[in-house]
Image: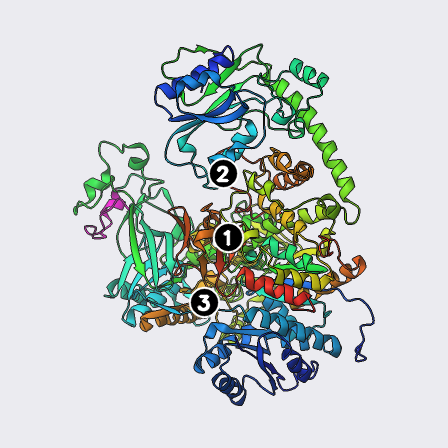
Amino acid sequence: MKIGVYVCECGTNISGTVDVADVAEYAKSLPNVAVSKYYKYMCSDPGQLLIKDDIKELGLTHVVVASCSPRMHEPTFRTVVEEAGMNAYCFEMANIREHCSWAHMHEKFKATEKAKDLVKMSVAKAALLEPLEKKQVPVTPAALVIGGGIAGIQTALEIAESGFKTYLVESTPSIGGRMAQLDKTFPTMDCSACILTPKMVDVARHPNIELLTYSEVTGIDGYIGNFTVTVKKKARYVDIEKCVGCGLCAEACRLKDRVDDEFNENLGKRSAIYVPFPQAVPLKYTIDPEKCIFLKTGKCGDSPPCVGACAADAINHQQEDEIIELDVGTIVVATGFDLYDPSQKPEYGYGKIKNVITGMEFERLVSASGPTEGHIEINGKEPEKVVFIQCVGSRDKEGNEYCSRVCCMYTAKHAHLVRDKIPGAEVIVYNTDVRAYGKGFEEFYVRVMDEGVKYLRRELDDQIEVVENGDKAIVKAEGHPDIEADLVVLATAIEQKKDIADISKVLKISRGADNFFLEIHPKLRPMDTATSGIFLGGCCQGPKDIPDTVAQASGAAAKATIPLAQGKIDLDPQTSFVIENNCAGCGLCVEACPYSAIELMDGKAEVNEALCRGCGLCSATCRSGAIQLKGLTDHQLISMIKSSLSEVF
Amino acid sequence: MGTYILENEEALKKVLENMLRKGMVEGVMVQTAGESGVFTSIITDPDFISKTAPLAPLFSNNNAVFLQNNGTRNIAVVVKPCEARAINELKKLNQINTDKLVVICADCQGTINPRDGLITEPLTEAKKKELEKDSIPIRKACTVCEHFTPPEVDISIMAIGTTGGYILATDREELLDGLELKAGEIPSGRNAEVEKIRKENLEKKEKMVEELDKKLGSPDTLVEFFKDCIRCDNCRDMCPICYCKQCYFETPLGDLRTDEMLHQAATKGILRIPPDILFYQLTRNIHVAAGCVECGACEEVCPRDIPLLDVWKSITGNVQGLFEYVSGMKRDEPLPLVGFKESELEEVK
Amino acid sequence: MEDEGGAKESWEPKIIGFFCNWCSYAGADLAGTSRIQYPTTIRIIKVMCSGRVNPQFVLKAFQEGADGVLVSGCHPGDCHYIEGNYHARRKLTLMEDLLEFTGVDPSRFQMSWVSASEGQKFAEVVTEFTERIKKLGPQTKLSGGEG
């Protein structure tokens, strides 16, 4: 065994504190070290060449580089040693910059001693490193997109356009998502439906897209390139092959205009058999099993009127959920968001005072396709004074700490729409910092103020209360005179989906403190999750407006397409392995593995290397050390422990 | 669940014999009073059942050890509650297939190490007084035992609370096929009596733990405590919960060769041999604490009379208490050390 | 506080840290990048997940003479491997319980959640831990030659 040790000066980043010459000299005294050198920049071309030449000339079997964090340059140096013919996994790094020179800038002697220890530990581990072989597996050339809002639509279209089969799974009866509920979009005031509907139709028509609406992903197995996805196609009780979307069934339904219409935020009514909105894709009817009299009681008059009304014979109350499996190579999660429920804060009076509504409810009121056909009215009257309250459920130390990013601009849009539709109306916006950071936002905000909308500032901690007063609501904001308003609109925050715990469990991806899905790097890898092959699009990762959602969705599509285009992927060889003779088959490792990568076969644990992600939970659980992690074995770790603490070898 | 009256130990023997004769099991593991004393045996010939002493209050080791990796053939086993708990614990660890066992377990009112006296009749309060007079000690583990009634087993035999005779309880009535047992009831006063004994034992246990804690509170007492250990590894080999095929201390990492001993000696200047006594005991503690059934077998087999049970009582109580777990009471429940709760142990910041 | 004289003027604790790759090791990196200064007492061993830390490693570290052991992973809910830190928390709490029994002061062992963005917290944890260990003095219970 011949170990080469290379100590980096990193300009003066390391050598300004650590005596690199001393460290390199010390390394020579360590067991198995054949050569030890220091150099200005180990990662530079000449630095790399230094290592490569030594590997070739001296026949080094292992290399230790003492420099920056392995999180920085480990891949670089692995490639370097590999290019010189050494196995990439016989390489080890000692972090003497981030963990040493930069952290102990005023303690040169102690920092140097620590650097020596870190090198000693790395050498001890390196001596036990064994060559590992990378494995390649083929990639299933198909993608799954979960969620059919604008993010999912955009992602699916772009992956499909790249030539790959794309499954788009949506839990509601139609794609379109939140954007379909919007009337206009800020700051350009495009009609939301006008720009969204064509894209929805594109999805339905695209030969590479298979649309699965009213369906839920219930299980994901496998790993990047080879996921097996279980999808539950919920019973629609309507044969979508036969349904022509004529709507005669809904007309005939005995619950016509009696079921709360969630698309209209429950401000309107629908039948128990319904399409969420007229432009739905697919334009196929669905029976609401929670409401349908026949499904609930087994009886609906002499025979259900919907069945009689359907000329296509499409209605089938006996239909059952169907479970299907999909094989895909990559997955994009675009599950969208829910909105904060302001009844959690009783001071706003939401749910008790009729005059208080949410921004999304306003959106439906003002929409030409909404329950009032776009006529803004409250208690049957056009409001004369409208108060908007911002930051409801966001920027809240006790609740959602984050800024929900879209509320300032959607409030400006709403204020504009009030002034547009009711020219004489007085419009007041209670705000705390108007965040008009996007393209065209500031201009729009100024325009709305110029239109006569009054912006009143209040601090986040200032008390605010809405109280009922006859058919009006009084807004009492600390530091401001009370305002008697006809309509109060709450700018409620974007939140993670309420059923996210279920979705997370299936996806096995983690969430941040804000409950949104966690990207692996906030700046450089905003679409990647910690699970390779699963990417994030749109608001499931954090609040976004439509342009940002579309941008992220396109990015996620590009990320998800790369492995499909490559056709094969490398698996990290640093996986677990079982020393069969030592295994008692107790199954503790099977229980501990978060990826179901271990199975008991004939009373012995067996690792599926393709599923193993190398966390080492199994190894820490095994009592006899019968399951080990390549590149981080008990032996290697204990060797590091020992070398760090002892002066002798 | 069916509950039946067994007039006496002989009636229990009939149950065993019936199982053998009917071919429900191929053998019965049970204590036998033979010519060389009382020993645990496996009986395949039903005629030998008459020689058995199924309820003899003797314990020299935990017989669950011998049931590990039981094969595909059915046997009935008559065991103490601590053995039954070990069986259940090993079932969860895939080391025992309980589908192939008929576990019969009776209330245990204390046991005696056979080397101290060969008592074959079941213990009662009166009998215990007699033993005291004869200076025959009840095993320490039994005097501080909290779980002396059957855990989840196939057939439970209840003695506590009955006025002579036993109550047999089982969910597997097919095991009694062909027997004409009189239906009985679990005596109403049983629970109170069980709780009373448990309370007494618990008090003794707490005192034991307290004393140990006092002893171990001062420096270097752990070294002192284990100073006589010769690393014979009996405690490990006879521990039903130490189930590994390959002990860490027999792998190259744990089985120190002289080079490694020299390394350890050099770092400290001196190394005691056998090495790693504390590390060995502590490792066993880590591995076993969550599953320990506190049977005291380790202490019984220790040739140097190290009071190992005291240590286990202290640790097991802490660890299982921490996870609200009592080992071996059930056959199917999550093992504490491979599970977790998101909301627990929130003091870690 | 220059110490270029080089002599060991006083006893310095030896602390072994087991840090997960994704959060805590990155948090320690960030402390360095941000030039946050903390004592030189800690030697960090990178593991992929705090759940990789076998309680035996902690015992081994004490046996080999560590004065303190620090295990650090992602905050609950943020584990890169979904639940590894929860496993670590359970296993190592058991360990901590045992330490008490061995006579090793349990406060020589610490578990802390440090995220990739908590360079400051990391430095504080190491500083406070070092101070605590300094007060306790060298650990000899498990590292004595007679054990």
Q: The residue tagged with tag 2: helix, strand or loop?
A: helix
The residue mark sitting in front, 3 or 2, is 2
Asked whether the beta carbons under mark 3 and mark 2 sit within 8 Å of each other, the answer is no
Q: Position of residue A92 (x, y in %)?
A: 54, 73
Left/right placement of residue B272 relative to residue A357 reads right
Of residues C145 and A9, which is closer to you in this image? C145
Residue A528's disc number:
3
Q: Position of residue B283 (x, y in %)?
A: 61, 49
Span highlighted in magenta in the image: A236-252
* Picture residue at 59% right of the left edge, 69% below the top: A124
Q: Which residue is mark 1?
A: A357
Question: Given the image, on which type of amino acid does mark 1 rest?
Answer: Ile
Does residue A422 show up? no
Of residues A198 and B343, which is closer to you in this image? B343
Does residue A391 show up? yes
Same chain for the residues under marks 3 and 2 in the image? no
Q: Position of residue B342 (x, y in %)?
A: 56, 48
Residue B90's disc number:
2
Q: The residue tagged with tag 3: helix, strand or loop?
A: loop
